[in-house]
Amino acid sequence: MRPSKLKTGLAALLICGAAAAGARAESASARPPAPMPPARVVSINLCTDQLALMLAAPGQLVSVSKLSHDPDSSSMAEAAQAYPTNGSGAEEAYLLAPDLVLAGTFTAPATVDMLRTLGIRVEQFAPANALADVPARLRQMGAALGREAEAEAMIRAFESDLAVLSRTPARRPRAALYYVNSYTVGDRTLAGDILRAGGFANVAAEAGLSRGGTLALEQLILLDPEVIIEGRDYPGQSRAEDVLHHPALRALTGARVAGTLTDRDWICGTPKVLSAVRKMRDLRLSLEAGE
């Protein structure tokens, strides 16, 4: 190739390269800037309290709901003590000058509507109905807080630990979850999934209950589960609690009444559910060992 033609070709390439670089720069400048993470976050729901406590950057979370300080309800009650509480009302949340409010899908619609009318961003979280929902809730909270990397790291740890805890057993003992007022839950609930992950078969399925419902004491006795896991009997007096102390439960010769194992770790779809799965696995192993 002649020198003149070579110079012409190089010049053309340089011009094309410059034009392409300019187009990329123009395209990048045309994109909207990434949204800034919220600086003041208020949570008005027990489960969003705990997710935010796990993922929020220092100083980002400014208030949590009153329930988060209750050790009977909150798995992170100790950590929550460092934060002021709110009564989950729109007026109180607004006065805290948040740029993000975290709520549940069952938070009063009037509260959510009022906050949004006042120009406050509200992010709502659905309750977890299965262990598989935990990563989704963590990912949603990570995105809401601008803490995606921290959320993904927590998801990886959760999934790894759950895989170890929930290895399929050789045999699944038949178990019943039994609460105040003869209430029980089936497999399509977070508690039912915790029971399954711990290695048990849920007798609620035999009674036709996939979610929640009443399991009469007589029906429970006829089902004759190998273990009965009771719900918590809270302080106070109610005839609805009498079923947990009924002599018929203690008279079941083939069933072990394991006592109260369903607690605050069973309520919300956070990595704290791993503690509940671990208790169920340990209970199953103790049954296998004849303890």
Image (cartoon, grey):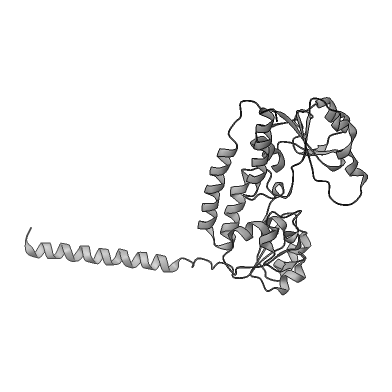
In the image, 56: left or right of 96? left
Q: Hey, which residue is sitting farthest front in the picture?
A: 291
Q: Nearer the viewer, residue 242 or 216?
A: 242
Q: Is residue 208 visible?
A: no
Percent of width and height locating residue 213: 81, 38
In the image, 69: left or right of 20? right
In the image, 218: left or right of 160? right
The picture quadrant where one finds residue 196 is top right
Q: Nearer the viewer, residue 234 or 285?
A: 285
Q: Residue at x 65, y 37 (%)?
A: 282
Percent of width and height locating residue 63: 69, 67
Query: What is the quadrant of the C terminus in the image?
Result: top right
Q: Is residue 9 visible?
A: yes
Vertical position of residue 251 compared to residue 10: above or below: above
Query: What is the quadrant of the N terminus in the image?
Result: bottom left
Q: Nearer the viewer, residue 278 or 185?
A: 278
Q: Nearer the viewer, residue 127 or 201?
A: 201
In the image, 42: left or right of 66? left
Percent of width and height locating residue 231: 79, 43
Vertical position of residue 40 compared to residue 221: above or below: below
The picture quadrant where one finds residue 184 is top right
Count of residue discs: 0
The picture quadrant where one finds residue 289 is top right
Percent of width and height locating residue 138: 59, 53
Q: Residue at x 72, y 67 (%)?
A: 115
